[in-house]
Image (cartoon, rainbow, N blue to C red):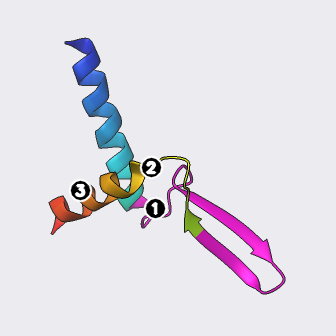
Amino acid sequence: MEKIKNEKDSKDRMQRNFFAHCGLEEHFVFVAEEKEGTFVRYIEELPELRDTIKEMLLQRI
């Protein structure tokens, strides 16, 4: 039971941070500063990230 609660708390925290940082939460994005400018992209190391973000956005519509 405790594990289920912790997983829900973790997901709730992730969702809260995502929206609090306008989708640019530090654990989700890669930022590179180059001569041409600053580039931001979602990290590719978490393949389920795109589906998680889609689910969070659809819940908020």
- Compared to 5, does 34 lie above or below? below
Instruction: Identify residue for label 3.
Output: 55
User: Residue 21: x and y, percent?
Assistant: 46, 62
Instruction: Identify residue for label 1.
Output: 21
User: Residue 41: x and y, percent?
Assistant: 57, 68
Q: Residue at x 35, y 34 (%)?
A: 10
Instruction: Identify residue for label 2.
Output: 47
| Circle 3/circle 2 CB separation < 8 Å | no
User: Residue 20: x and y, percent?
Assistant: 40, 59
Q: Secondary structure at mark 1?
A: loop
Q: Is residue 25 rendered to the left or right of residue 15?
A: right
Q: Residue at x 41, y 51 (%)?
A: 49
Q: Secondary structure at mark 2?
A: loop
Range shown magenta: 20-40
Q: What amino acid does circle 2 point to? A: Pro
Q: What amino acid does circle 3 point to? A: Glu
Upstream in sequence: badge 1 or badge 3: 1
